[in-house]
Amino acid sequence: MTKIRKNKSTYSELEQAVKNRINYWKRIKDLQEAHETKVKNILFRNNILRAQERANYQNEYDRLRSEIAFTVVPQQSINNIKDRIKQLEKLQIV
């Protein structure tokens, strides 16, 4: 009779081990999916920030160009504006 109990307990231990293994792989899969999602979110956010930065520089460049073209500003200000325009052009965003 003790042998039968050992077999039953061995069977239940084996069954429990298989269940644990299945749960383990489910957890691993969930962790991998979470990591992939996190990476995608980070890349998406970085792309949005870069696009926003480009738009800000483009807007600044356009504003400076129109300021030179359509307003009367002192020569000192014109020199400062032209220097800033050159800096923006060096960034190659404009």
Image: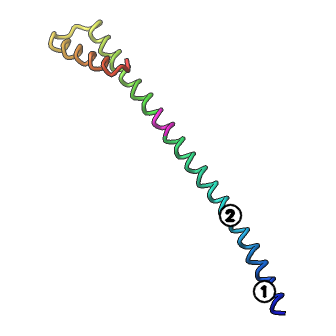
Q: Is residue 45 above or below residue 67?
A: below
Q: Is residue 44 a member of the stretch shown in magenta?
A: yes
Residue at the spot of label 1: 6
Q: Main secondary structure of the magenta part?
A: helix
> Could you tell me the amino acid type at mark 1?
Lys
- Total tally of numbered discs in the picture: 2
Residue lying at 75% horizontally and 74% vertically, measured from the top left? 14
Q: Quadrant of residue 53?
A: top left
**Which residue is outermost to the left?**
76
Mark 2 is surrounded, within 10 Å at the Cα level, by few (under 14), some (14 to 19) or many (20 or more) other residues, namely few
Dot 2 and dot 1 residues touching (CB under 8 Å): no
Q: Quadrant of residue 6?
A: bottom right
- Cα distance, mark 2 to mark 1? 25 Å
Considering the numbered disc 1 on the image, is that residue within a helix, a strand or a loop? Answer: helix
Rendered location of residue 83, percent (x, y): 22, 16
* Left or right: 38 as drawn, with respect to 61: right
How is the structure coloured here? rainbow
> Could you tell me the amino acid type at mark 2?
Asn
Q: Is residue 11 above or below residue 5?
A: above
Read off the magenta span.
43-47
Q: Is residue 82 a member of the stretch shown in magenta?
A: no
Residue at the spot of label 2: 23
**Quadrant location, the C terminus:** top left
